[in-house]
Image (cartoon, rainbow, N blue to C red):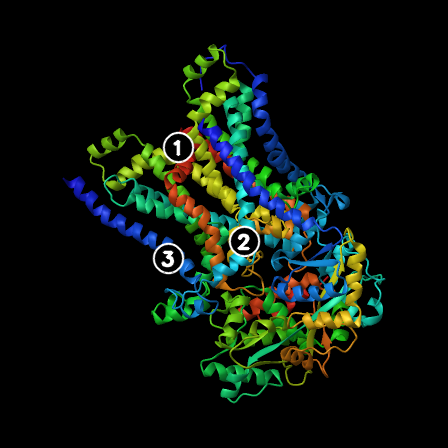
């Protein structure tokens, strides 16, 4: 950060040229569309010809019209629950696996490491469909009953009480590899002296973890929390593959991602007429929520460094 | 430099890969005397049959080739819209009836078909209605209608001494008897949501609320959507839930077909379009109309489902129009019907005999009964989702029949 | 003495935990594979075991029908092109940002990094309009700029750090000798940042290959579909042959999986890069 200012290296204008291509792609295809989506939310109508300015009309309608409000809050709450399950299962198990995998004297770690990451290489669509079959009582019900496992024979994805949890767990199964590996890297980065010092002072494994390792990997935990949060607020594929775009059953698996697709892009089956202004409004709110969620965590973990 | 050589290799490989793609596209555009039209649809299952139909058309118009390019049904609306917006839409396409199709006509995508020769003359008014704008203009040529009925396994019925029921009460009694024998009576599930509504509930509704003349009374508000007929209909769904497979909450539409096909379920309330799936079934099957309760008249939901229309921005309007006109002639309609997928019925005025035994079975159900399109289609599409959810909830026992009816009635504007 | 005993015990527990998880991972994959070799109805009668009669028909049907190879080609073109562009564009930008001092540079850097946090999906509606205006809608080329924009933040993030660590003396020596910055870039910096480049490539490979969202909303033309989008056509609403679906799923999963199994170290390295710098 505090590097010597070297007179050989030119300033500003020369470097702009290097940055220009990146800037072009980024602004035209990311920054500007994002900001313009915010603008679109203030309009109604589906294409340029029929667009009309209505100020905050879309937002008002979203929160006052009964069905829209019910759908939005439903999706919002479900997405938070989805995130909660991920933090609990994906990230806690990830830390557990990482601790195990950084145990220097354990054999077979390479094998375990390789296997953990396999689901992450699949497309979410693939895992969604696969688990849809696995959780289908019609498919395996008879065989499971014969194996005296009939408590497993339930329409897991068909009951509104269990569907969302199952979908969230499927998503965790898919993404487990990434946090695990990140934690492994972070744990490996902990200087040996700290661990040795704790060992000498007679700390047991749990104390070693809670008081030495965990605090030192907190920045990474924060990073992963942010990535999980952002990912979950965009989750769409997994619901699309295991249930349907409506978030069946009874909208219980409806997430912000599916709501956005249904309202802003595809329209309600079977009519299929989208409301792009409303869709943009949903996107804007998501944008704000993400900023509000990400910035504090980012600041907190940066301070840790 | 390793990086530059890697780039060279990469670009070389890229070029190798791109060339075949470009060449493949190129050969398609050759042969400029031949006109190639594309036809869009949501029927990914009918590629074979439509192929045959279009080959027949080629015999009549040798320089016109029509390619059938269906899209996955859940994506059809969104993707069709995308294509139309970006002016890359197909030349001909299937049009959904009523509101869904009207909207696309209003947006300027569907061409005005009113003056296609034979259209206004060869179809009844009620068959033209689904694709007619309020001002009388037609935006598509009616192509096929579908019916809804109960598929039943004749062998299982015979083995258990069961006869085709004529009332709803008899139907429930049969279900009860089958269940006591350990056979799943019905294959229907609710995982995909649309099927329980479109095939079962809406297929059954004419039994309770009557035909088209009664439906308009509900639309105008003269009759309420939570009157005794509706409550009885929802109650019927609640009664039938216990006869659906165990775990029916997770049973998808395809699972239901498999259950019926493997004889694990004795009956399946479904649309006529599935008839082709059981063409090679190892057992005897037939269809009967969903019976009305004692005291009411059995009616059939015979739903005008598909029409074909023309893209306003097609580069070959004359050829496209010619195809549509052909569909309005007796020869064209007969050829079309002969090649229609099993379970689709022609809507034209001429008498057309279908070859398929089961198709005729379906049509035979219509005789002596009132028919109507699916209840919500003509004017109440807004209520599709609420009604769908209400039916599912009433089956799961989360709502009483009265509550379900009330919830939908409350949303009627 | 006590410590090593404790460690030995933990190992059994650890192995149990890891084995359970491996089962949870491998069992569904096993199901996926063996059921793809069964027929439409036998996957219901015999869900968990190897097929009594191996049916290779599913795979041959998929190859014959369904434009499968075409989808594969499309995905390959899109991904390779996007990755190439991401690498080129972000390495230039990172070189500049690493060497350029000052507030503007820092602000630009943060501007790019912000993209890692914000999902490009929420701008979909506007992106649709842009693609429509550019006339790229319904072609595979509509995907490339989007993926490049998606991959830039992480690319710049990783590469800038890496380039900063290239020893100053090397670059300075070259400049004193009279090379231009471009030469310094290509002959010195790039070769030294090769590990970072492969990290960026691999990190972006999975999301680019497995993306369903943008192909779904941009592309409709059969001939332009990417692999994942193309296979969804087979999951028709009215008629799904699960055994064929599973064959298709297996084929879609194989490319990246095979690549991963060959290069697992680099893959994991790529993922870790985010953590270590973060």
**Label 2 crowding class (10 Å Cα cut-off): few <14, some 14-19, many 20+?**
many
| Residue B22 horizontal/vertical position (percent) | 62, 44
- Placement of B278 over or under C72, stated as above or below: below
Q: Name the residue under label 2.
A: C68
Q: Mark 3 points at which residue?
A: C27
Chain letter for the residue marked with disc 2 in the picture: C
Pick the residue in front: A231 or A20.
Answer: A20
Whether residue A158 appears in this view of the structure is no
Q: Earlier in the sequence, mark 2 or mark 1?
A: 2
- Name the quadrant of the N terminus of chain C: top left
The answer to whether the residues at label 3 and label 1 have Cβ atoms under 8 Å apart is: no
- Placement of C223 over or under B337, stated as above or below: above
Quarter of the image for residue B136 reads: bottom right
Q: Name the residue under label 1.
A: C276
Q: Are marks 2 and 3 on the same chain?
A: yes
Q: Residue at x 84, y 68 (%)?
A: B120
Q: Residue at x 58, y 42 (%)?
A: B18
The answer to whether the residues at label 2 and label 3 have Cβ atoms under 8 Å apart is: no
- Name the quadrant of the C terminus of chain C: top left
């Amino acid at each position: 950060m505090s590097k010597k200012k070297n007179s050989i290296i030119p300033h500003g204008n020369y470097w702009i040229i290097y940055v220009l291509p990146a800037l072009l792609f980024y602004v035209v295809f990311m920054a500007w569309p994002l900001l313009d989506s915010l603008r679109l939310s203030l309009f109604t109508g589906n294409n340029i010809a029929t667009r009309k300015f209505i100020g905050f009309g879309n937002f008002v309608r979203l929160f006052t019209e009964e069905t829209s409000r019910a759908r939005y809050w439903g999706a919002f709450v479900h997405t938070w629950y989805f995130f909660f399950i991920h933090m609990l299962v994906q990230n806690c198990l990830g830390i557990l696996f990482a601790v195990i995998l950084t145990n220097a004297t354990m054999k077979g770690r390479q094998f375990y490491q390789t296997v953990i990451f396999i689901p992450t290489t699949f497309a979410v669509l693939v895992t969604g469909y696969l688990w849809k079959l696995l959780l289908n009582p019609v498919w395996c019900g008879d065989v499971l009953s014969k194996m005296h496992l009939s408590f497993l024979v339930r329409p897991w994805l068909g009951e509104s009480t269990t569907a969302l949890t199952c979908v969230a767990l499927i998503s965790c199964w898919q993404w487990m590899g990434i946090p695990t590996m990140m934690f492994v890297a972070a744990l490996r980065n902990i200087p040996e002296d700290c661990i040795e010092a704790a060992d000498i002072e007679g700390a047991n494994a749990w104390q070693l973890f809670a008081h030495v390792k965990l605090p030192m990997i907190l920045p990474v935990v924060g990073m992963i929390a942010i990535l999980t949060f952002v990912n979950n607020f965009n989750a769409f594929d997994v619901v699309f593959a295991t249930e349907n775009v409506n978030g069946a059953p009874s909208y219980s698996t409806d997430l912000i991602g599916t709501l956005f697709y249904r309202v802003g892009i595809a329209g309600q089956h079977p009519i299929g007429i989208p409301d792009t202004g409303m869709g943009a409004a949903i996107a804007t709110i998501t944008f704000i929520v993400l900023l509000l969620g990400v910035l504090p965590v980012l600041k907190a973990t940066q301070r840790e460094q | 430099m390793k990086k530059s050589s890697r780039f060279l290799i990469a670009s070389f490989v890229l070029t190798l890969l791109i060339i075949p793609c470009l060449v493949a596209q190129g050969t398609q555009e050759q042969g400029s005397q031949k006109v190639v039209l594309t036809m869009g649809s949501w029927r990914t299952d009918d590629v074979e049959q439509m192929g045959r139909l279009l080959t027949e058309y080629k015999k009549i118009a040798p320089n016109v080739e029509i390619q059938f390019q269906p899209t996955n049904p859940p994506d059809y609306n969104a993707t069709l819209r995308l294509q139309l917006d970006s002016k890359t839409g197909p030349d001909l396409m299937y049009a959904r009836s009523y509101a869904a199709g009207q909207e696309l006509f209003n947006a300027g995508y569907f061409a005005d078909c009113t003056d296609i020769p034979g259209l206004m003359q060869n179809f009844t008014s009620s068959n033209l209605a689904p694709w007619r704008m309020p001002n009388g203009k037609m935006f598509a040529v009616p192509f096929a209608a579908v019916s809804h009925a109960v598929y039943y396994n004749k062998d299982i019925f015979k083995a258990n001494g069961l006869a085709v029921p004529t009332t709803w009460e008899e139907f429930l009694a049969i279900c009860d008897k089958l269940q006591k024998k350990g056979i799943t009576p019905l294959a229907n599930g609710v995982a995909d949501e649309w099927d329980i509504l479109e095939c079962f509930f809406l297929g059954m509704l004419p039994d309770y609320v009557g035909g088209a003349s009664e439906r308009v009374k509900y639309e105008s508000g003269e009759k309420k959507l939570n009157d005794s007929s509706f409550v009885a209909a929802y109650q019927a769904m609640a009664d039938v839930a216990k006869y659906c497979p165990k775990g029916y909450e997770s049973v998808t539409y395809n699972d239901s077909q498999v259950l019926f096909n493997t004889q694990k379920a004795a009956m399946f309330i479904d649309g006529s379009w599935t008839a082709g799936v059981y063409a090679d079934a190892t057992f005897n099957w037939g269809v009967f109309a969903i019976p009305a309760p004692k005291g009411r008249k059995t009616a059939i939901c015979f739903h005008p489902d598909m029409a074909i229309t023309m893209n306003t921005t097609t580069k070959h309007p004359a050829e496209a129009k010619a195809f549509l006109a052909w569909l309005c002639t007796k020869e064209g309609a007969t050829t079309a019907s002969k090649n229609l997928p099993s379970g689709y019925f022609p809507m034209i005025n001429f008498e057309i005999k279908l070859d398929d035994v089961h198709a005729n079975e379906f049509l035979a159900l219509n005789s002596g009964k009132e028919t109507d399109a699916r209840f919500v289609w003509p004017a109440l599409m807004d209520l599709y989702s609420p009604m769908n959810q209400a039916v599912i909830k009433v089956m799961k026992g989360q709502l009483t029949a009265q509550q379900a009816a009330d919830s939908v009635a409350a949303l009627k504007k | 003495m006590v410590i090593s005993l404790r460690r030995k015990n933990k190992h059994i527990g650890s192995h149990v935990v890891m084995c359970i998880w491996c089962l949870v991972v491998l069992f569904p994959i096993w199901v996926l594979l063996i059921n793809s070799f069964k027929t439409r109805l036998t996957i219901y009668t015999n869900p968990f075991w190897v097929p009594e009669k191996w049916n290779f028909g599913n795979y041959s049907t998929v190859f014959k029908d369904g434009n499968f190879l075409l989808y594969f080609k499309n995905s390959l073109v899109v991904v390779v092109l996007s990755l190439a562009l991401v690498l080129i564009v972000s390495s230039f930008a990172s070189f500049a940002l690493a060497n350029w001092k000052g507030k503007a540079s820092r602000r630009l850097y943060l501007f790019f990094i912000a993209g890692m946090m914000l999902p490009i999906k929420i701008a979909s509606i506007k992106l649709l309009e842009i693609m429509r205006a550019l006339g790229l809608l319904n072609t595979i080329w509509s995907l490339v700029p989007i993926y490049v924009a998606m991959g830039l933040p992480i690319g710049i993030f990783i590469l800038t750090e890496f380039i900063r660590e290239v020893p100053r003396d090397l670059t300075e020596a070259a400049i004193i000798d009279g090379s231009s910055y471009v030469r310094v870039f290509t002959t010195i910096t790039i070769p030294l940042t090769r590990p970072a480049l492969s990290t960026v490539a691999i990190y972006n490979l999975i999301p680019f290959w497995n993306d369903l969202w943008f192909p779904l909303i941009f592309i409709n033309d059969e001939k332009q579909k990417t692999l994942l989008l193309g296979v969804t056509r087979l999951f028709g609403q009215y008629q799904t042959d699960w055994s064929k679906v599973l064959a298709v799923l297996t084929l879609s999963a194989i490319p990246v999986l095979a690549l991963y199994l060959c290069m697992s170290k680099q893959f994991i390295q790529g993922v870790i890069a985010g953590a270590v710098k973060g």
